Image (cartoon, coloured by chain):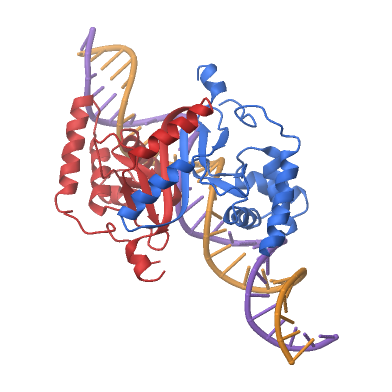
Chain colours: A blue, B red, C purple, D orange
Amino acid sequence: MREPSPAFHDHDHANCAEDALAFADELASRKGLRLTPVRRRTLEILLTEHRAMGAYEVLDRLAADGFGNQPPVAYRALEFLVEHDLAHRIQRLNAFAACTHPGDKHSPVFLICRACDTVAEAAAEVVLDAIDSAAEAHGFAVERVNMEVLGLCPACKEAGA
Amino acid sequence: MREPSPAFHDHDHANCAEDALAFADELASRKGLRLTPVRRRTLEILLTEHRAMGAYEVLDRLAADGFGNQPPVAYRALEFLVEHDLAHRIQRLNAFAACTHPGDKHSPVFLICRACDTVAEAAAEVVLDAIDSAAEAHGFAVERVNMEVLGLCPACKEAGA
DNA sequence: TACTGTTACGTGATAATATAACAATACCCA
DNA sequence: TGGGTATTGTTATATTATCACGTAACAGTA
């Protein structure tokens, strides 16, 4: 497996982490959430890395920063972020990634490269309607939607993976 | 958590397992696959239970039937079934379920009840087009799509979960 | 300020899920 | 029949996730 790249294509990454953190702060004060030090730092880690990270990898970083070093520390912080749509869980990889469209009401579609594990978050609002009507036909009340697409990113496709 | 029911609504379940097994046999001989005893029995277990089962739960059944009792036995058989679309992996639950529409070219949407863990497999062909175009915009080559919707099934909604 | 209910955190232990590696066996086909 | 391949069994271990409990921080009340 090749090294994951920060995203499929370059972008202005310099400030995007900063912006996202600022947004999180604003969201927290607006909704009365407690973006505590561990939680904020966890988000910062995900934003800075800009890739899907395993809980234990995040935990190592947190521990290095003086926070607790037991699994629940990371899992709880990550759970909080996911719950408030500041991060997503990538089931396929048992990993977590900061949301790249915070604030947008979105149902993200994750494009996961099977060769380098890079994850891109695509928008696909259209999909939601289809899901809703399919669910409705079953009398099912939709709460959260998770869509994951496995395949090859441009770089790995090029490289002939 | 309530007990999972076989499906959101009753259906003629008596023969559906039998039919699916017959289909699998036919598929195997048509495509030259080796639906060996462990593999066939694994599919039969999933079909008969008609619910999402963990790998270790499947393993217990297999062991009771005289097959090996170590994890790889179950994981390998399940992997085979998933690869050939005879079963699906439900990431959210770390579990596996027999495909309820074998043979159909489908991109299943799983409706997962957060209260009782029941899983229904809905069809949503429309969704695929949307996914494809979203992926195309990223230069991403789609290979497999997995969509999981979390919410409440009719029974649990009724029960006020 | 003291009291109280609630939420969050730290920690140790353990559960649940999944894979690596290798040996033994069964199958296929020339 | 023999040699290559796919499959299975088995041992060991890696990885991911949760439970349980005690303490600390916070919010609201009087």
The residue depicted at 72 percent of the width and 48 percent of the height is A21
Whether residue D26 sits left or right of residue B45 in the image: it is: right
Q: Position of residue A11 (x, y in %)?
A: 68, 30
The residue depicted at 17 percent of the width and 32 percent of the height is B26
The residue depicted at 19 percent of the width and 42 percent of the height is B20
Whether residue B149 sits left or right of residue A72 in the image: it is: left
Above or below — where is B132 with respect to B15? above
Above or below — where is D17 with respect to A111? below
Q: Position of residue B139 (x, y in %)?
A: 52, 25
Residue A158 in which image quadrant: top right
Closer to us: A60 or A110: A110
Asked whether residue B104 appears in the rendered view, the answer is yes
Quadrant of the drawing holding the N terminus of chain A: top right
Closer to us: A54 or B151: B151
Residue A17 in which image quadrant: top right
Q: Position of residue A25 (x, y in %)?
A: 73, 55
Closer to us: A57 or A135: A135
Above or below — where is B85 with respect to A35? above
Asked whether residue B56 appears in the rendered view, the answer is no
Whether residue C10 sits left or right of residue B51 in the image: it is: right
The residue depicted at 31 percent of the width and 55 percent of the height is A138
Closer to us: A128 or B72: A128
Number of numbered markers: 0
Q: Position of residue B127 (x, y in %)?
A: 39, 39
